[in-house]
Amino acid sequence: MKKQAPIGLFDSGVGGTTIWKEVVALMPNENTLFLADNKNAPYGGKTKDEIIALCERNTECLLNNDVKIIVLACNTGTTNAISYLREKYRHIPFIGIEPAIKPAALGSVTKKIGVLATQGTLTSELFQKNSNSLAQNNGIEFIERVGEGLVKLIESGKINSPEMTILLKKYLYPMVEEGIDYLVLGCTHYPYLLPQIKQLIPENIQVIDSGYAVARQTKNILSQNQLLNDATEKPKHRWLANGNIEILKEFAPDRNDLEISML
Ligand code: DGL
């Protein structure tokens, strides 16, 4: 495996770019390839089998582009499909993302933690197992809400819309009333909602996501496998979409080493 090969990342849509940004900030020397399967977004309400099939297709696409590692920049994909993918594609490391409920549980004083994520993530065996164990061993009460409709609005460019505010109030106010002191953003699209979320909830509630932890873990695994890029050429970045590239352009940083195109 070549060190110069790109880090591959995928998500159902533009949400994965929140992880891409963390990865590039932490490893500025790496080439990257991000795939947004936005023809099939959102994943959140799909069955486990459907999510596995889509993740498998995304994996094949990245492997055809010779990536050296795959970051599954999607909580719904990770919690439903990562064991299957690791089993099937043993020659390539996979890094997944899960809601950051463990750090929240360690920091929480009220022992009440809000989790906003997709239905697919919240009902997955992996999430259920991890949250039940924290509930039992650390006395945590999780107040879980499916962020129904949020990804669809983000994908259609309606991030700052009245509909968005209505949905966020509906999901967040009951958590605040329950006395949460942490809010876990369990979907890679949601960090883009941070400005609105912060306006709706009290300042003392910590809002956390797993983006930086995923980038750090990616770096650790590349380093352990001697796969960190040590070439001196300027790295290149590509974002691919199979449905709509306009939305990717809207969220893209202004940099001339990033190429955005249709798959
Ligand atoms: N961004 C994804 C996640 O982290 C998927 C959201 C969706 O497609 O519903 O779960």
Image (cartoon, rainbow, N blue to C red):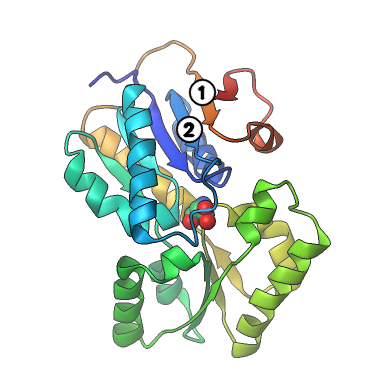
Q: Residue at x 49, y 62 (%)?
A: 45
In this view of the protein, can residue 100 be seen by the observer?
A: no
Q: Where the N terminus falls, by quadrant?
A: top left
In this view of the protein, can residue 68 be seen by the observer?
A: yes
**Residue 112: percent from left, percent from top:** 50, 84
Tell whether label 2 touches label 1 (CB within 8 Å): yes
Which residue, given by chain and number where applicable, does mark 2 sit on? 34
Q: Tell me if 223 is positioned left or right of 261 in this view.
A: left
Q: Under tag 1, what secondary structure?
A: strand
1 or 2: mark nearer the eye? 2
Q: Tell me if 87 is positioned left or right of 77 in this view.
A: left
**Residue 60: percent from left, percent from top:** 32, 32
Which residue, given by chain and number where applicable, does mark 1 sit on? 237
Quadrant hosting residue 7: top left
**Residue 78: percent from left, percent from top:** 36, 54
Q: Amino acid at mark 1?
A: His
User: Is 60 placed above or below 179 here?
Assistant: above
Q: CA distance from mark 1 to mark 2?
A: 8 Å
**Residue 257: percent from left, percent from top:** 58, 18
Q: Residue at x 48, y 50 (%)?
A: 211
The mark found on residue 97 in the picture is none
Residue nearest the observer in this picture, 88 or 116: 88
User: Is 125 placed above or below 51 here?
Assistant: below
Quadrant hosting residue 252: top right
